[in-house]
Image: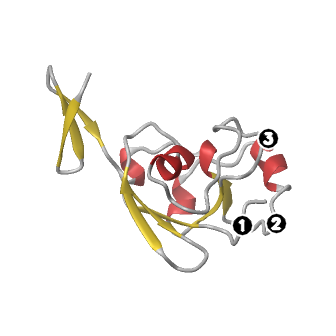
Amino acid sequence: MRGLVHCGMVLRCPLTIETMPQVTFITFSGERHVVDAPAGISLMRAATDHGVPGIDGDCGGNCACATCHLFVEAPWAGRLSPRSDHEEDMLGLTVDPRPTSRLGCQIRLTDALDGIVVSLPEGQH
């Protein structure tokens, strides 16, 4: 079903409203990419769907490659569910893991994350 985007929401017929939380991706060089993405998709998909450089998502969001590594800025980090053991294991494969490291494929956008800011590492491989 096709929809009309209006004020950050997708309107569908019959009228249903799909919210579009806003995400700011900050590349390693400091370039900001602000995107609106449907609630329910992952940060990885929001980045790849909008061509944000620095997020590869080689495994397609299956938590199997760590090429969607990102750093979640405060205060957003405290609003996320804890990392799973599997995500912790995959983050061990990254070049520069930090306490705020997450895999973008493991974070689903919700209305509560509208405005989230994440930073990207220098590289994913």
Element type at marker 2? loop
Rendered location of residue 33, percent (x, y): 43, 66
Crowdedness near tag 2: few (<14), some (14–19) or many (≥20) residues, C-alpha within 10 Å: some
Q: Which mark is residue 95?
A: 2
For the residues marked 1 and 2, what is the alpha-carbon distance in whole angstroms? 8 Å
The total number of labels drawn is 3
Badge 1 density bin: few <14, some 14–19, many ≥20, Cα 10 Å:
some
* Left-right relation of 119 to 85: left
Amino acid identity at mark 2: Val
Please, is residue 70 above or below residue 8 in the view? Answer: below
In the shown orientation, is residue 108 left or right of residue 96?
left
Q: Secondary structure at mark 1?
A: loop
Label whose residue precedes the other's in the sequence (2 or 3): 3
| Residue 85: image location, x then y, percent | 80, 42
**On residue 123, which mark appears?**
1
Of the image marks 1 and 3, the number of the one nearer the N terminus: 3
Which residue appears at 57% of the width and 61% of the height? 77
Instruction: Name the residue at 61% across, 67% down.
Output: 120
Identify the residue at image location x=56%, y=62%: 53
Query: Disc 1 marks which amino acid?
Result: Gly
Q: Position of residue 104 (x, y in %)?
A: 60, 50
Tag 1–tag 2 contact (CB < 8 Å): yes
Label ID, residue 108? none
Q: Is residue 40 left or right of residue 53?
A: left
Q: On the rendered image, what quadrant is the C terminus found in?
A: bottom right
Labels 2 and 3 touching (C-beta < 8 A): no
Q: Which mark is residue 86?
A: 3
